């Protein structure tokens, strides 16, 4: 999977990153909740579209309590994922104006060398879709949002067209459909027995947040 071009989903909490991730993978791999901060460790999988495959990474929200040990770990994980990206999808909520957290994350992304596509999620109505062209979004200093509804699937095909074209332009073309599925291993156990520590050792890097907090 590492040879595939990598697309990373970033954004503040509750903008629909995990919903879009599940939509792209066509499976419920990431937990979706109205409670902020549901995603902590990054999740990754493959998106197959028109016979071509890309690697997709879903990250935790970058906003929250900076004094919280787990949230500090989430930020570290997200920054690591960003460094692995060939292309970044920056999700925002078109049902609201840009929040300070959106502006802060946009500033961080502008200082990265990796190209960014702004994705305007929650565009469930024509009015919400029209919000993508409001001048407030220009304050991000990034291209205008591509409007989608991850819940309904509206606009996701158009988004994938943009993503795949951008990857080809970057000379990171999507891979051919794999004929053999990768082996999957599950690590299970009660809280605080060392599952995340074991997984970090197996992959050779800090991919899963470890904490004394259950």
Image (cartoon, helix red, strand yellow):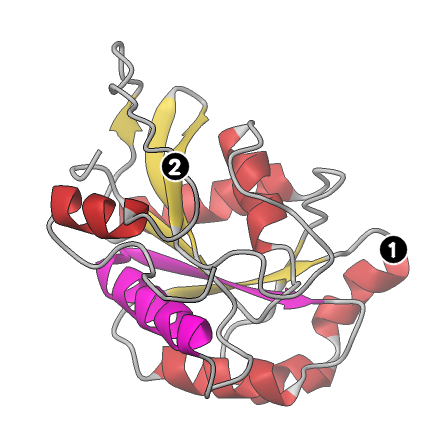
Q: Is residue 171 visible?
A: no
Left or right: where 43 falls relative to 91: left
Task: Point out which mark residue 126 bears.
Answer: 1
Q: Earlier in the sequence, mark 2 or mark 1?
A: 1
Asked whether 89 falls inside the magenta stretch, the response is yes
Compared to 197, does 70 lie above or below? below
Instruction: Determine the residue positioned at 45% across, 74% down.
Output: 71
Asked whether 113 falls inside the magenta stretch, the response is no
Left or right: where 64 falls relative to 174: right
The quadrant of the rendering that contains the N terminus is top left
Alpha carbon of mark 2 to alpha carbon of mark 1: how far? Answer: 46 Å
Q: Secondary structure at mark 2?
A: loop
Residue 172 rendering spot, x and y as whole percentages: 22, 45
Task: Point out which mark residue 56 bears.
Answer: none
| Along the viewing direction, whichever of 109 and 203 lies nearer the viewer | 203
Instruction: Determine the residue positioned at 50% across, 41% down.
Output: 160
Looking at the magenta stretch, what is its main secondary structure?
Answer: helix
Toward which corner of the image does residue 183 lie, by quadrant? top left
Left or right: where 23 falls relative to 47: right
Residue 186 rendering spot, x and y as whole percentages: 34, 28
**Mark nearer the viewer, 2 or 1:** 2
Instruction: Determine the residue positioned at 31% across, 55% down.
Output: 208
Compared to 159, does 34 lie above or below? below
Left or right: where 122 falls relative to 109: right
Task: Point out which mark residue 189 bears.
Answer: 2
* Residue farthest to the top, as pictured: 179
Magenta-drawn segment: 69-93
Residue 90 rendering spot, x and y as whole percentages: 50, 65
| Along the viewing direction, whichever of 40 and 175 lies nearer the viewer | 40
Instruction: Determine the residue positioned at 40% across, 55% down.
Output: 41
Residue 144 rendering spot, x and y as whole percentages: 59, 70
Q: Is residue 84 visible?
A: yes
């Amino acid at each position: 999977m590492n040879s595939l071009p990598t697309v990373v989903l970033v954004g503040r909490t509750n903008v629909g990153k995990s919903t879009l991730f599940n939509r792209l993978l066509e499976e419920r791999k990431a937990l979706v909740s109205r409670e902020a901060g549901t995603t902590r460790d990054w999740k990754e999988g493959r998106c197959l579209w028109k016979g071509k495959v890309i690697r997709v990474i879903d990250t935790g929200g970058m906003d929250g309590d900076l004094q919280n040990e787990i949230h500090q770990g989430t930020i570290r994980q997200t920054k690591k994922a960003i460094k692995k990206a060939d292309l970044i999808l920056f999700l925002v909520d078109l049902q609201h104006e840009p929040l300070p957290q959106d502006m802060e994350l946009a500033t961080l992304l502008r200082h990265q060398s990796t190209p960014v596509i702004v994705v305007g999620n929650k565009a469930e109505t024509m009015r919400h879709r029209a919000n993508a062209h409001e001048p407030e979004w220009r304050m991000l200093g990034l291209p205008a949002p591509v409007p989608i509804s991850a819940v309904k699937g509206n606009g996701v095909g158009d988004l994938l067209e943009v993503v795949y074209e951008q990857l080809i332009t970057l000379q990171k073309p999507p891979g051919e459909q794999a004929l053999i599925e990768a082996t999957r291993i599950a690590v299970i156990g009660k809280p605080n027995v060392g599952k995340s520590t074991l997984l970090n050792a197996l992959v050779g890097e800090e991919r899963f947040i470890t904490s004394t907090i259950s």
